[in-house]
């Protein structure tokens, strides 16, 4: 079934006439953030080197999915948290191991500066380059409540640094943050749709044992979204999203093994199929309600 939203797979197909996967690696940079839902407390440097991570995942995807093209994705932690020269050595090392078609760098809005962005811009002549900002909400009261440690305005400043570069920007949004209503989440999407961003990732908020959020959950102060409510909010967000923004993800995925809630008892594939089916059958699609 064709997705009623602009998937990353479609973006790759239309721009590169291929199918490509992201090789997600840990660049050993960690993160000093204190987000109340984060698994950072479980963080351990990976036992594998960067090279080993890349080779293992590349071989797995090649064998299992017959994929031949890849993006190098620095996902875990804050992947701009070092001086530009050091970061360049890290990115160069990863990119030297395979003819990747693109580079994706996950980071925080308060962890980039002009020098780092200009270094990242140097890769755009060879690669499809994306910077992913963990923003999660455009409401400062929410960002403060979940201790993101930055404001919406910090994000706008970071986005401004990408102006006049060929770097594409993806924004992470979490649906179901404490204190947020469905209307606030849709409003965040409308605000983002008016900005020069090219991608978005939606996650549902899940509770991991040992986090500050798990304490709130156990004390009955936080209730995660039920799947049916998540689906409703997500579809509303997609309908309020500018139609040319690439949707990299519509669901969070916990791999830590510390998940407390929610446990939706449906697989990721079933959820993806259900979202597409619901949207298609009800005539709903990305951008229908924007502007
Ligand atoms: S910025 Fe990301 S990695 Fe850092 S604490 Fe927050 S959620 Fe965790």
Image: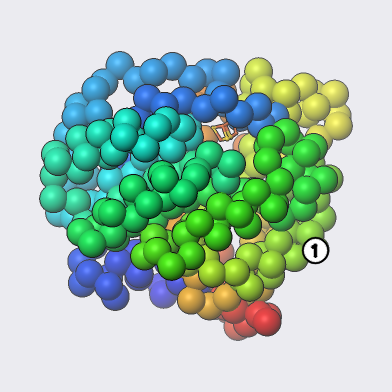
User: At which x and y percent is residue 134?
Assistant: 56, 46
Residue 1 in percent (x, y) is at 41, 73
Q: Position of residue 253 (x, y in %)?
A: 50, 41
Q: Quarter for ligand 1?
A: top right
Q: In the depicted view, which residue is nearer to us: 239 or 144?
A: 144
| Residue under pointer 1 | 183
Question: Measuring 42% from the left and 30% from the top, which residue is drawn there?
Answer: 82
Task: Report the side of 43 relative to 49 (left or right).
Answer: right
The quadrant holding residue 142 is top right
How many circles with numbers are drawn on the protein?
1
Instruction: Categorize mark 1 by other alpha carbons within 10 Å: few (<14), some (14-19), many (20+).
Output: few
The answer to whether residue 184 is visible is: yes
Which of the 4 quarters of the picture holds residue 171? bottom right
Residue under the point 35% across and 20% down: 46
288, 114: nearer the viewer: 114
Helix, strand or loop at mark 1 = helix
Classify the position of the C terminus by image quarter: bottom right
Please tell me whether residue 161 is drawn above or below residue 111 in the rendered image: below
Asked if one can make out residue 278 in the rendered structure from this viewpoint, the answer is no
Picture residue at 45% right of the left edge, 43% below the top: 106
At x 86% / y 29%, what residue is drawn? 220
Could you tell whether 202 is left or right of 117 in the image?
right
- In front here: 75 or 85? 85
């Amino acid at each position: 079934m064709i997705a009623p939203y602009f998937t990353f797979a479609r973006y790759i197909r239309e721009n590169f006439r291929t199918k490509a996967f992201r090789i997600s690696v840990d660049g050993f940079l960690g993160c000093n953030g204190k987000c109340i839902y984060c698994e950072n407390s479980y963080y351990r440097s990976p036992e594998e080197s960067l090279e080993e991570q890349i080779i293992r995942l590349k071989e797995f995807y090649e064998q299992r999915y017959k994929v031949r093209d890849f993006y190098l994705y620095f996902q875990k932690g804050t992947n701009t948290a070092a001086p530009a020269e050091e970061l360049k050595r890290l990115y160069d090392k990863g990119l030297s191991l395979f003819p990747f078609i693109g580079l994706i760098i996950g980071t925080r809005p308060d962890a980039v500066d002009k020098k780092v962005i200009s270094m990242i811009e140097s890769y755009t002549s060879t690669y499809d380059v994306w910077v992913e900002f963990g923003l999660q909400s455009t409401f400062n009261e929410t960002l403060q409540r979940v201790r993101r440690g930055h404001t919406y305005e910090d994000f706008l400043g970071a986005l401004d640094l990408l102006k006049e570069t060929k770097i594409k920007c993806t924004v992470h949004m979490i649906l179901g943050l404490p204190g947020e209503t469905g209307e606030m989440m849709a409003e965040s999407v409308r605000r983002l749709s008016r900005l020069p961003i090219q991608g978005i990732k939606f996650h549902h908020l899940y509770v991991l044992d040992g986090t500050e959020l798990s304490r709130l959950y156990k004390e009955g102060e936080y209730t995660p979204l039920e799947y049916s409510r998540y689906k409703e909010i997500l579809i509303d967000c997609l309908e309020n999203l500018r139609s040319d923004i690439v949707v990299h993800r519509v669901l969070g995925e916990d791999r830590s093994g510390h998940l407390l809630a929610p446990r939706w008892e449906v697989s990721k594939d079933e959820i993806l199929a259900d979202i597409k089916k619901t949207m298609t059958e009800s005539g709903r699609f990305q951008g229908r309600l924007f502007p």
